[in-house]
Amino acid sequence: MTDKPVAIVTGGSRGIGAAIVKRLAKDGMHVVAVARNVDKLQAICDEVKAAGGSAEPVACDIADSAAVTKLIEDAFEKHGRLDVLVNNAGITKDGLILRMEDADFDTVINTNLKSAFVAIRSAARPMMRNKFGRIINISSVSGVIGNAGQANYAASKAGLIGLSKSVAKELASKGITCNCVAPGFITTDMTEVLPEAIKQGVLNFIPLKRFGSADEIAATVAFLASKEAAYITGQVICVDGGMAM
Ligand code: NAP
């Protein structure tokens, strides 16, 4: 049991998720950090503890619905509350539509979209009981404006937007908000692997003329998770240097 607000953050072992874990812990929450690689999670949680915060690693493959349900139930049973859920974990399997295999589509939809649906379904009951909840789904500008070569990824990220708006309407009367953050091009492992020519091409479409940082996404998530954001629900906040306007 903890008297701190409890947040679950998927994909907390690196990149944007790790920045969210550190930021929410800095803001006074106990953070359950989730990913498959528990060693990397442990390192992030150690960093949080060294800075005076509170975080624990939980290994879970979010593409496994039963495992996600258990993850949420266990966290609620252990801590007696669940205040914030951040569905951040995500993958890409890019390819042009003519060559995209069924498996590449299904894996991305399961990991990026279905996992969020399952996590929200499990988190809704404890949040309703406490008459408070903040659900934040990490979408993408690809889900807002589309992107060639990312039919699967863009569909999963656009799906998160529809999911969030529906959940926002369904749970508003219970004191629960649900919003999306849609990052543009953020420097992480996910974007590091892209060829330099592609990165330069993307830069031309960013009015602020630079890539974003994981900390800038974490700051937006922290705001949506805070009491100050109580009157914001069903929204998509693009944090993208102006890319999708
Ligand atoms: P990243 O550096 O590749 O990190 C992805 C995280 O998700 C890792 O912690 C990874 O941990 C976890 N993960 C992946 N598959 C998982 C699974 N099946 N089960 C549990 N955890 C899993 O990605 P990122 O750039 O930080 O992106 C984070 C989110 O932001 C994603 O949803 C991404 O689509 C979105 N986004 C990123 C950008 C960008 O420019 N970077 C732009 C728009 C949106 P393990 O591998 O250990 O499981």
Image (cartoon, rainbow, N blue to C red):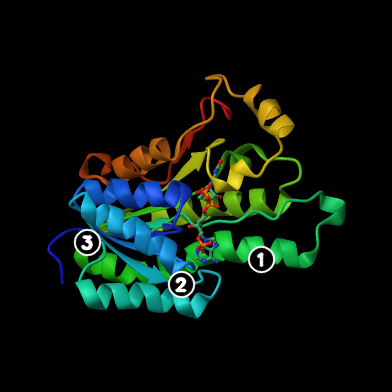
Is the residue marked 2 within 8 Å of ligand 1, measured from its CB? yes
> Which image quarter holds the N terminus?
bottom left
Q: In the image shown, does 232 or 122 lie closer to the viewer?
A: 122
Q: Position of residue 192 (x, y in %)?
A: 60, 42
* Residue for badge 1: 107
Quadrant of the rendered image containing residue 131: bottom left
The residue at 58%/27% (across/down) is 243
Tell me the kind of residue under disc 1: Thr
Q: Quadrant of the C terminus?
A: top right
For the residue marked with disc 3, what is the amino acid? Lys
Residue at the spot x=30%, y=45% of the render? 23
Q: Position of residue 115 (x, y in %)?
A: 51, 66
Q: Residue at x 54, y 75 (%)?
A: 64
Q: Nearer the viewer, residue 176 or 39?
A: 39
Crowding around mark 3 (Cα neighbors within 10 Å: few <14, some 14 to 19, many 20+) is: some
Mark 2 is surrounded, within 10 Å at the Cα level, by few (under 14), some (14 to 19) or many (20 or more) other residues, namely some
Q: Could you tell me how far apart the alpha carbons at marks 1 and 2 are, in whole angstroms?
A: 16 Å
Secondary structure type for disc 2? loop
Cα distance in 3D space between marks 3 and 1: 34 Å
Can you tell which quarter of the image residue 79 is in?
bottom left
Label of residue 131 in the image: 3
Q: CA distance from mark 3 to mark 2?
A: 27 Å
The correct choice, above or below, for 80 with respect to 239 in the image is below
Q: Amino acid at mark 2?
A: Cys
Q: How many marks?
A: 3
The picture places residue 163, in percent across and down from the top left corner, at: 51, 56
- Tell me the tag on residue 60: 2
Give SS at disc 1: helix
